[in-house]
Amino acid sequence: MFYQRPGMTNVEYKKQFDALWDTVMQFGGILGNHPILINTRATEIAEENNRLNAAGVVEANDNDTAAATVDVENRMKACSMLGGANNEKFSSQKKTTWRTSTSWVILRIRNHFSG
């Protein structure tokens, strides 16, 4: 597993993490493709936009699913990035990452707390 080594800056860690993530994706990896999470998020997006079928049930469309796919991948990437972060500095943040949707937000939070 890739992790933030002692002395590695947050910016360097993100740069190397992104390079590793992108390499896996270019070779056919599907790190953020979790159908249940994507379907659940697509339904949330449809509900937020009040999309109902004829029976009055929330129904996601292709655009909702596409947006959910990107959102879930970004959240999974952020969780993975934080998972390898220095535990001494960032253990408390590892408990609340799912609501933080991008690795750039994680980087900003980590830089704020790194002291």
Image (cartoon, grey):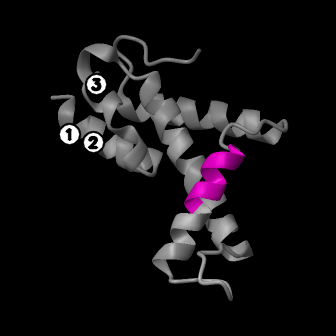
Looking at the image, residue 92 sits to the left or right of residue 99; the answer is left
Would you call the spot at circle 1 few (<14 residues within 10 Å), some (14-19), or many (20 or more)? Answer: few
Q: Which residue is mark 2?
A: 109
Please provide the residue range marked out in magenta: 34-41
The first of marks 1 and 3 along the sequence is 3
| For the residues bearing labels 2 and 1, Cβ distance under 8 angstroms | yes
The first of marks 2 and 3 along the sequence is 3
- The secondary structure type at the circle numbered 2 is helix
Q: Which residue is mark 1?
A: 112
Seen as rendered, the residue at the extreme bottom is: 54
Q: Is residue 39 magenta?
A: yes
Q: Which residue is mark 3?
A: 90
- The secondary structure type at the circle numbered 3 is helix
Q: Quadrant of the C terminus?
A: top left
Callout 3 amino acid: Phe
- The secondary structure type at the circle numbered 1 is helix
**Image location (x, y in percent) of residue 73:** 61, 48
